[in-house]
Amino acid sequence: MSKQTLTLNSQLYEYFQAISLREPKILVQLRQETAKHPMGIMQISPEQGQFMALLVQLMGAKKR
Protein backbone atom coordinates (compact mmCIF):
# COMPACT_ATOMS: atom_id res chain seq x y z
CA MET A 1 0.00 0.00 0.00
CA SER A 2 1.04 3.54 -0.56
CA LYS A 3 1.48 5.93 2.34
CA GLN A 4 -0.08 8.56 0.11
CA THR A 5 -3.36 7.97 -1.71
CA LEU A 6 -3.48 11.00 -3.95
CA THR A 7 -0.85 11.85 -6.52
CA LEU A 8 -0.16 15.38 -5.34
CA ASN A 9 3.18 17.10 -4.96
CA SER A 10 4.50 17.14 -1.40
CA GLN A 11 3.45 20.73 -0.62
CA LEU A 12 -0.11 20.21 -1.84
CA TYR A 13 -0.37 16.85 -0.05
CA GLU A 14 0.79 18.42 3.24
CA TYR A 15 -1.82 21.18 2.79
CA PHE A 16 -4.50 18.58 2.05
CA GLN A 17 -3.63 16.69 5.23
CA ALA A 18 -3.54 19.88 7.31
CA ILE A 19 -7.05 20.91 6.32
CA SER A 20 -8.79 17.55 6.00
CA LEU A 21 -7.37 15.11 8.54
CA ARG A 22 -8.76 14.85 12.03
CA GLU A 23 -6.11 12.56 13.42
CA PRO A 24 -5.47 12.37 17.17
CA LYS A 25 -1.83 12.71 18.26
CA ILE A 26 -1.74 9.08 19.38
CA LEU A 27 -2.68 7.88 15.87
CA VAL A 28 0.02 10.09 14.36
CA GLN A 29 2.56 8.58 16.75
CA LEU A 30 1.37 5.03 16.03
CA ARG A 31 1.53 5.64 12.27
CA GLN A 32 5.07 7.03 12.52
CA GLU A 33 6.22 4.14 14.71
CA THR A 34 4.60 1.56 12.41
CA ALA A 35 6.35 3.11 9.40
CA LYS A 36 9.68 2.09 10.96
CA HIS A 37 8.64 -1.58 11.14
CA PRO A 38 9.79 -3.90 8.31
CA MET A 39 6.14 -4.62 7.50
CA GLY A 40 5.31 -0.91 7.65
CA ILE A 41 4.89 -0.86 3.89
CA MET A 42 1.48 -2.46 4.46
CA GLN A 43 0.19 0.73 6.09
CA ILE A 44 -2.64 2.62 4.49
CA SER A 45 -2.56 6.38 4.16
CA PRO A 46 -4.13 8.48 6.93
CA GLU A 47 -6.88 9.75 4.64
CA GLN A 48 -7.79 6.15 3.74
CA GLY A 49 -8.01 5.28 7.43
CA GLN A 50 -10.21 8.29 8.11
CA PHE A 51 -12.48 7.34 5.20
CA MET A 52 -12.74 3.73 6.39
CA ALA A 53 -13.65 4.93 9.89
CA LEU A 54 -16.40 7.08 8.37
CA LEU A 55 -17.77 4.09 6.45
CA VAL A 56 -17.81 1.95 9.60
CA GLN A 57 -19.62 4.71 11.47
CA LEU A 58 -22.17 5.17 8.69
CA MET A 59 -22.82 1.41 8.60
CA GLY A 60 -23.52 1.46 12.31
CA ALA A 61 -21.11 -1.42 12.94
CA LYS A 62 -20.88 -2.56 16.55
CA LYS A 63 -18.63 -4.88 18.50
CA ARG A 64 -20.20 -8.06 19.87
Image: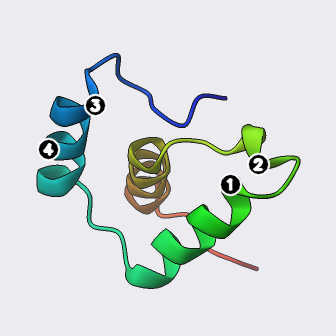
| Label 4 sits on residue | 15
> On the rendered image, what quadrant is the C terminus found in?
bottom right
Q: Secondary structure at mark 1?
A: helix
In x, y percent, where is residue 26?
A: 50, 83
In x, y percent, where is residue 52?
A: 49, 48
| Label 2 sits on residue | 40
Q: Which mark is residue 35?
A: 1
Q: Is residue 44 above or below residue 50?
A: above
The mark that comes first in sequence, 1 or 3, is 3
> On the rendered image, what quadrant is the N terminus found in?
top right
Q: Nearer the viewer, residue 47 or 30?
A: 30
The mark that comes first in sequence, 3 or 4, is 3
Give the residue at x 59% y 63%. Answer: 31
Q: Which mark is residue 10?
A: 3
CB under 8 Å between discs 2 and 1: yes
Q: Label 3 to label 4, Cα distance in Å?
A: 9 Å
